[in-house]
Amino acid sequence: MIIEMKTGASRAEVDSVVQKAKSLGLGVQLNLGTDKTVVALLGGHTGQLATDLFAVLPGVESVTRIMKPYKLSSREVKKQNTTVNVGGVEIGGNKFVVMAGPCAVESETQLMEAARIVKAAGATILRGGAFKPRTSPFSFQGLEEVGLALLARVREEIGLPVVTEVVDSHEVAIVAKSADILQVGSRNMQNYTLLTSIGKSKWPVVLKRGFSCTVTEWLTAADYLLAEGNNNVILCERGIRTFEDTTRFSLDIGAIPVIKKASHLPVIVDPSHAAGHHDLVPALAKAAVAAGADGLLIEVHPNPAEALVDGLQSLNPVEFARLMEELRPIARAVGRTI
Amino acid sequence: MIIEMKTGASRAEVDSVVQKAKSLGLGVQLNLGTDKTVVALLGGHTGQLATDLFAVLPGVESVTRIMKPYKLSSREVKKQNTTVNVGGVEIGGNKFVVMAGPCAVESETQLMEAARIVKAAGATILRGGAFKPRTSPFSFQGLEEVGLALLARVREEIGLPVVTEVVDSHEVAIVAKSADILQVGSRNMQNYTLLTSIGKSKWPVVLKRGFSCTVTEWLTAADYLLAEGNNNVILCERGIRTFEDTTRFSLDIGAIPVIKKASHLPVIVDPSHAAGHHDLVPALAKAAVAAGADGLLIEVHPNPAEALVDGLQSLNPVEFARLMEELRPIARAVGRTI
Amino acid sequence: MIIEMKTGASRAEVDSVVQKAKSLGLGVQLNLGTDKTVVALLGGHTGQLATDLFAVLPGVESVTRIMKPYKLSSREVKKQNTTVNVGGVEIGGNKFVVMAGPCAVESETQLMEAARIVKAAGATILRGGAFKPRTSPFSFQGLEEVGLALLARVREEIGLPVVTEVVDSHEVAIVAKSADILQVGSRNMQNYTLLTSIGKSKWPVVLKRGFSCTVTEWLTAADYLLAEGNNNVILCERGIRTFEDTTRFSLDIGAIPVIKKASHLPVIVDPSHAAGHHDLVPALAKAAVAAGADGLLIEVHPNPAEALVDGLQSLNPVEFARLMEELRPIARAVGRTI
Amino acid sequence: MIIEMKTGASRAEVDSVVQKAKSLGLGVQLNLGTDKTVVALLGGHTGQLATDLFAVLPGVESVTRIMKPYKLSSREVKKQNTTVNVGGVEIGGNKFVVMAGPCAVESETQLMEAARIVKAAGATILRGGAFKPRTSPFSFQGLEEVGLALLARVREEIGLPVVTEVVDSHEVAIVAKSADILQVGSRNMQNYTLLTSIGKSKWPVVLKRGFSCTVTEWLTAADYLLAEGNNNVILCERGIRTFEDTTRFSLDIGAIPVIKKASHLPVIVDPSHAAGHHDLVPALAKAAVAAGADGLLIEVHPNPAEALVDGLQSLNPVEFARLMEELRPIARAVGRTI
């Protein structure tokens, strides 16, 4: 942490910064005698200290953090890649993983049909929402417990592991009964009560990026899961909110190499929510594979025209099968298999 | 809702749009014979219908929503201003309301001192956080239940109504015991489980704007509270996330007149979280009064240099007293009192 | 400038950073022996050096700039406020200055009428565009030279100084003949060819903020004008681009106190382009006065329903006169006059 | 264009909307008798009409544009892909085109060496800046005319067509003497004086996206070039400004399929300016190929550690050669060659 003192800051003001740093067990590197005094604070936990602790002191002009605020998700702490294993499927390894299925579970027929379609095309994990957080209270909110039961039944019948969203810290255990992977939605990325609860469960979890959260905040949120001893964390980029309005969100493709450099956690991409339109999903999915993502989370519906939620961004069976074929040579080109 | 058909869309495609609209009870206004067929759908609930229902149909180029997705918070539904009454304080009326106090409850001494200071300067509601959602799991998370007990004690002693944050849908009742107003934090604005629970409680609530949510999404979130019969809803603008980095967030001052036009709900402003630095708080607070806000939510600490959370953006007692003096003539200039 | 070396960076890598710094005349403060080596570079011109010079060196993890990149516009270089004097009107002094008039000059009648209206209501500078940069090539582009002639005529007739936009570095002299203040539009804030040309002219200039430029970039752009010896620089905040869509742009009200702290230059506010709708203009104008701006640049049209450009955001004569009345007590409340 | 009237708008107010529409030669489709009157305006040029023309009329609640504001760059106007041919290189055809070279021309040795390197690795167009618009007036601004002469010499010697930036509308002819393709930089995307001048020159042009402009504004800016009869327009996505700060800009990979759907113009990607760091460039470059871009514009420097501009984001010769090898199989996977 670097403290820039104001021009003309007094010796007493500098001393008070130094005292505070020492009281927190930090090393201090001091430079006096130039235009501006600059104090460097050294120590392994400066990333976790609030800059405010020093910024409030008299005579301080600015405080700059050098260390990252995240720790457990950082590649500095763990060099080798983390992989998450779920029902025989490894996420984060050499094989590129496709999770696919409907946005919302609507009925047994719909879910069973979707599961057969995505499995036949090569997906290895089934997605489907039972609890649907919706912008408006007047929209369909999901089948809830009934939806969970359908997921459990289809999982057994078709033999695909299941990923589904959990929205309440008190429902982690019940959702985990029907799901192999829990999903934290974008709007809950900073719902720390929920994160702590899932962390304690140790259950595999997909942590979607908050649509206006930085990569740094995202990795710091992952620390909430890891700090409780849950190492089965999969990150999921799903588009960020920008001024551009021809896509629903802007897929931050740059986040993929950034995370591969900064963190040991696997990262997948949800091209459906970013695109907002099925026509645009294939290009984003292909870009994700090429950029080095470990998997995809894609919305597929047996009949998008009758979907209760997000039909426009869902691929139909033909589109999905074609996309899977197109992804394979790209995966090979980057040294992976699907 | 306006459906633009693709150039060359077939008669059958247009018919299928019309059929779907009629099946949903909508009126249809159809124009054929120009370059492009445009279908206008009419009816009171088109704001609550997903555009996807039509966008997925073959031959459709685009779907544009005319009606707003929010309903109960809209001024179209309720013309006169809503006021919220809490322990003798009216929010949304002619008197401008200042809620002030520390970001986090740290001790009885700190809270008692803060309460005395803000009351003496003219604040009529005390703020203080017992549960503190923090970006990092390694940061101070608040005194939790102990903090609630301190809030209850100081409220009785000093005689100021209290506003405090609730972060878990299962803790609404317990927090309500120590608080006159519940606060939904920015990161929880779209935590619909929490909103529904507070809605059912009918307890007065400050709904902070999600830092990357549009005004439209904010008012739609308010609908979650109103739909459960809770009419005691106070909106709070606290800055949005933009590319600008000299302030912590960018206070969206334009949201004040927008909400006054679109909604009947009272709206207050939190200049502290937007500014991120106590030097900038007064200008934002004054702007809020001038722009027509109904109140302020300000962080004040007896000794910011020792604050456990957000010390840099907290006003000290002298700064707060001076600000209150400066706000009074501006309030008078816009026809209000403090 | 602070150089963070990678964990395990070699002594030779650290030396090469130190050598480069010394070759640039910088002081070096070095810390070895902790987890990470941190090198602080000291010297008055580090704000103007590219961080890349060090970031590219082997073993460097990150480079953080402490000094601001702007210099001449900084309050560190000049403590006292700059004022700009134009035809007897002082901008940046105690008197709050209102510049008003139509977006585009459309005809002599329109301009003359607008000038009379705004002067009668208390504006002291007339605005009007002769060159109109438009998003589409098929839109009205302004009366150009004819518009300049009209501005010159009305200025003489009514006796108000005139501000108008210049869009081409080769037209600075010709526009200056008809205008007391040149305006650099938002889309040209980083048109350095234009800035250099206006800088050389020494003519008073309103530098509008690029709608997606940071305050730091804005002040650095002002340095282009100041570096050529033009000290007659007035900054103008006009809204930034964000995700919010109920206003045309988001007025960054926080930029006012930030600039007052960081720079000696006067700063005014254009509430019309930020709002995009005349109903919202008064609240933003009032907020600007309260937040400490030095003036306003407002669009007023004798008959907005017939305006060729931006009619929706233009105040009509009655609205403008009312707003001026409402602004006066707010100005008094912050110790200024209008 | 869809006009929504206010609830309770009078018949006279509706009539005045209808009159204005008819006076502009538009067809009118009117619906009376529901809650709200909605007026649809029909006609081929509604995309080029300002919505303000109707929004200012009394009784109007909102005006929604259905038609896009761009026209000549639209795929509706021209179905088949445009290709641009420069010195035997076709841009927009089956062959993927790589333009590479240093950010700034620094010396004959540097440019010659860079040209040899990129040609050997398979690039078919040489990039290099002679005029460098820089954020600060104290930074290196390019070799200007000397740089142009070097570009001309190296072009002849090495036999690669050249792309370079032009920043002044009066210098189009002189720059065109040394360049096969003119480049409009991001900060000049809405410099309409410059666009018009290049449009008249008919010279091939790379139009970089303004870093805060929407795709719609970008295509409308392209209309400025096309409207002057210049059909040799190549679009270039180079990252947009968002809140994310681990990359210099956020590459909007979604813009590639959006443009392929909406426009007939070729589109290339500049991964260097988006990434801001050479480590991140390869992932973005690969994503661009996979997403369907027609080419890349990449910064390569013989010795990035000594680059005068943007060294950190420049690939060194080894990195560039490796990237070219990695791109080839991805190109094949999407049916193209490099």
Image (spheres, coloured by chain):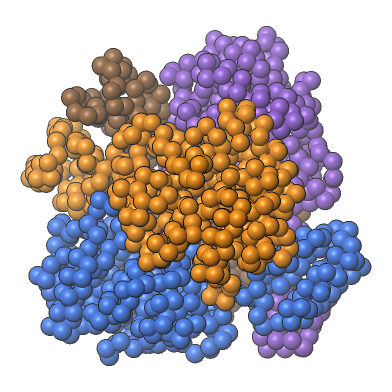
Chain colours: A blue, B orange, C purple, D brown
Image quadrant for the N terminus of chain C? bottom right
Quadrant of image for the C terminus of chain C:
top right
Closer to the camera in the image, B125 or A9: B125
Residue C264 in percent (x, y) is at 78, 42
Along the viewing direction, whichever of C116 and D147 lies nearer the viewer: C116
Q: Quarter of the image holding residue A240? A: bottom left
State the residue at coordinates (72%, 51%): B317
Residue A337 in the image: state x and y as whole percent: 31, 85
Tell me: residue C86, above or below residue A139. above
Give the left or right position of residue B300, taking residue A185 as reference: right
Write down the quadrant of residue A167 in the picture.
bottom left
Residue at point 62% right, 58% down? Answer: B102
Q: Is residue B115 visible?
A: yes
Left or right: residue A139 compared with residue C47:
left
- Whether residue D321 appears in this view of the structure is no
Q: How many marks?
A: 0
Where is residue B334 shown, x and y percent of the image?
Answer: 58, 28
Left or right position of D71 against C179 = left
* Location of residue C115 with respect to D205 vertically, above or below: above
| Near-viewer residue (A32 or D267) | A32
- From the top left corner, tell me how far across and down residue A333 is, in percent: 36, 80
Q: Residue at 57% of width from left, 11% of height from top?
A: C113
Residue drawn 57% across the image and 60% down it: B153
